[in-house]
Structures are given as structure tokens and as C-alpha cells.
Image (cartoon, rainbow, N blue to C red):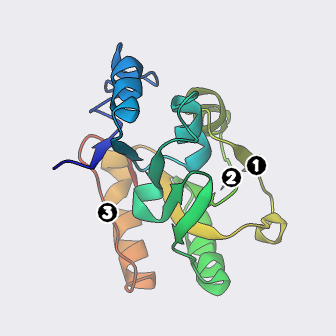
Amino acid sequence: MIKLIASDLDGTLIPEGTQEMEDGFMDVLGELLERGYEFCAASGRQYANMRRVFEGYRDRIGFVCENGALVMEHGTIRYAQKLPRELVSEVSADILSLSCTDILLSGVKACYIHPRTDWFENQIINVLKNETCVFQDLDEVDDTIVKIAMYIYDFPKNIETSGHFLRKSMGCLPIFYVPGMTGLT
């Protein structure tokens, strides 16, 4: 008997390159919930972003956010991968030392960026529509950090240097490259 249905968002329920749900899905979701099924949305997206996408149903479903680093159910934290503050400081300093990168710290309350370009800031705030705070100094960030992501400009040219540098300085952390994406998380 099926009790829970879980689905990825980008490229599954949300067509690639867009920010809007596939037509008709919300009607199907409403019907599933009325029939007693549980639904869980899973994504690398932040919690606030996913709640926006599921407006109208957000208090009735579960969310696996930030590539599994944060799990929310009916507004309650069920799991949060809390990165040690010292590690966040070290990794952030290393990423910010690379001129070809931008950084995004994912917190429980919001995401935090230190943008080097207007393009990056616009992408996070206006295109992805993340709940976003801009920081100049890491001490300004008052949140539990669950994920660190970096964007690499001119990816084909800079991945070798950036990836090598990060693996050497942070050998204990996994570095994931998603084909078709232009950044590492």
C-alpha cells in the first residue's frame, strides 16, 4: 500500500530552465492529499523557495531541502545538518579567496550571499526567488548553516583550478558536480 509519494522538483515537476510548477500538478497534489496520501517535495532548493512553490499546500506536505541537509514537516524541523561554525568560516574564506567564485551559505532561515557581481545577486534574489541576505562579514550571519555552495564563473576554464584547490584545502568535504550545472555544491 502506498502511503508516501516523494518527488524531485527541478527537471521533474518543474520543467528545466523554469521556476514554475508543471501545469495541472497542483490539482493532482490536492487530490492525493484528499485521498490521504502524504507528499514530500525533495530538492537542492532552500526551504523558503520550496514553500513559495507549494503555496496553498505548504503546511500539508513535507520538504527535503538543500540536497537533504534540511528536512521540514508541517513547519517543524525534522532534521538539520548543522555545519560547525569553524568549518563554515574556513570553507567560506577558501571560496572567497578564489576570484572566479561566488558563495552561497544555506541556513535554516535564509540563504546568505557575498556577491561579487550584480548578475549573481540578481540570479539568487530575483530569478530563484530565494529568501536572501547579503553579508559582508561572516559574523553578520546569525543562522544555522546546513550547506555551502559555490558558483564558478567561466566554468570550463576555472573548474580545474577551483576543484583542485578545494579538494586540497578541504579534503574531508565531498564536492559534487552536477552535469549541466555551472557550479559545485
Regarding residue 97, the answer to whether it shows in the image is no
Q: Disc 1 vs disc 3: Cβ atoms closer than 8 Å? A: no
107 and 2: which is toward the camera:
2
- Where is residue 117 drawn, in percent x and y? 65, 40
34 and 124: which is toward the camera:
34
Q: Name the residue that disc number 2 marks.
A: 110
Q: CA distance from mark 1 to mark 3?
A: 24 Å
Q: Secondary structure at mark 1?
A: strand
Give, as a three-letter code, the residue at label 1.
Cys
Q: Nearer the viewer, mark 2 or mark 3?
A: 2
**Residue under the point 56% across and 49% down:** 47
How would you rate the neighbour count of disc 1 (Cα within 10 Å): few for under 14, some for 14-19, many for 20 or more? some
- Where is residue 153 drawn, in percent x and y? 46, 45
Q: Is residue 152 above or below residue 160?
A: above
- Where is residue 32 drawn, in percent x and y? 33, 31
Q: Which mark is residue 176?
A: 3
How would you rate the neighbour count of disc 3 (Cα within 10 Å): few for under 14, some for 14-19, many for 20 or more? few
First reached walking from the N terminus: tag 1 or tag 2 = 2
Q: CA distance from mark 1 to mark 2?
A: 7 Å
177 horizontally vs 97: left or right: left
Q: Secondary structure at mark 3?
A: loop
Q: Name the residue that disc number 1 marks.
A: 133
Give, as a three-letter code, the residue at label 2.
Ala
Task: Please tell me in which quadrant of the rendered image residue 118 appears.
Answer: top right
66 horizontally vs 40: left or right: right
Q: Which mark is residue 49?
A: none
78 and 93: which is toward the camera:
78
First reached walking from the N terminus: tag 2 or tag 3 = 2
